[in-house]
Amino acid sequence: MPLVLTFLGILALIFLIAFLHLDTFISFVLVSLGIGLASGMDVTAVGKSIQTGIGGTLGDLVLIIGFGAMLGRLVAESGAARRITNVLINIFGIKNIRWGLALAGFIIGIPLFYNAGFIIVVPLIFTIAASSGLPLMTVAIPMLSALSVAHGYLPPHPSPAAIAGQLHADLGRTLIYGIIVAIPAIIIAGPIFGKTLTKFKIKPEKEIFNIREVPDHDLPGVGISFLVALLPVLLLTMTGPLKSVFPAGSFGHKLVTLLAEPYFGMLLSVLVAVYWLGIKRGQPVKAVMKDLEEAIKAASPVLLVIAGAGALKQVFIDSGTSRYIGDMLQGVAISPLLLGWSIAAVIRVCVGSATVAGLTTVGIILPLIQQQTVKPELMVLAIGSGSLMMSHLNDGGFWLFKEYFNLSIKQTLQTWTVMETIVSIIGLFGVLALNLVV
């Protein structure tokens, strides 16, 4: 019976989101309520479970995602993203421009939410395609594949950060493993696949194509642009090993421990960005704070989706559904990593949202993680890569790509959908390979 309820619950979630277009947060709460009551929980217990799930899931994630949104906003508004791209294009040159764009997309994608990153890099893609004479798709796909990988694999992005929190995975190790897995995914889905798209003759809408270019002399410096964009990565990956350098209880150990906290690393990155990308460049403090306010507004819908998924996960646990599924899956002769990827991929294809797919999968797969020896950091990446599988007509990213590049639905399926599928499958292979050596 619990398995049937889980299946019906997921079908109901798909129906509410994909067909009725009901708000995702409301859909999660309704399905959580329905599964809880159908499982025999009383009304008070279901309500308590939903509240606990929302509170427990958000926790310090509000800080990470909130500060991440602020950092991304400052990187975008200041022109730091543009500076990073210019530098990398100059280094790689026209001949290897696809590789430079893939690297630029990856660096820019680390602090920026996907939609914000997309809007920022599209003008760069148009400008580079026009100046180099290269077909537009061969320029766009390398950069956007890197953005997609960062969105699906790497904290502090909302979905991987939330999945890591639910699975108690170490964010620093998740980030390191994620970068290792991301490299082949970006190479194959970006420059290599992008090179095959020369046959697509794309003419974007004139209003979009003719975007005013910000003068280079108004952009932030090279060093500070790279430092601010990469500071969260540096803090997450470098402070962990540094803990062992200082004796326990010493000031140095306490300082490194504080810097290693994801929320504090993000806060420090934001403060550095506020000064160097805002105030130092002549921006009034009030204007910079307004940018941060707008960033929080943009992040709030994502937080609600994560909160709703947390409610569903807690209902699965409190109703005994998770324990039942975990016991049942114990006898399944399949890698837990492959199973997590598969569940996320199926939900992604049905619902469209990578965030919904990833976070819904956690509630189903959580008991298996607790009973089998599998690194939670690798499970984060397996679920994250599965959640990117085969984006199509029910995904907002699909339509964003289609409209900006003025493509037909068939062309979008041949380019965007194939790219996302490659990213997902290579991500799975990368995780399975990494599982053999870590």
Image (cartoon, helix red, strand yellow):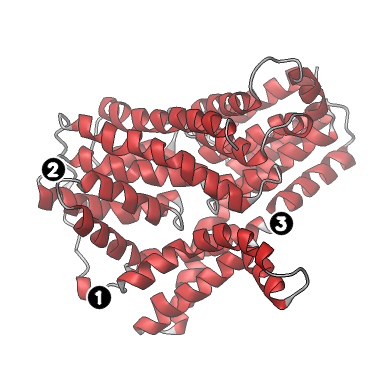
- Residue 222 x/y as whole percent: 31, 70
Amino acid at circle 2: Leu
Give the mark, 2 or 3, whose residue is nearer the N terminus.
3
Percent x, y for residue 187?
34, 38
Secondary structure state at the residue bearing disc 3: loop
From mark 2 to mark 1, how far is it between C-alphas? 27 Å
Q: Is residue 422 above or below residue 124?
A: above
**Which residue, given by chain and number where applicable, does mark 1 sit on?**
218
Element type at mark 2? loop
| Left or right side of 285 for 259 | right
The amino acid sitting under disc 3 is Gly
Q: Pick whichever, 421 or 14, lies toward us.
A: 421
Q: Is residue 126 visible?
A: yes
> Which residue has dot 2 on it?
134
Mark closer to the chain start, 2 or 1: 2
* Residue 59, label in figure: 3
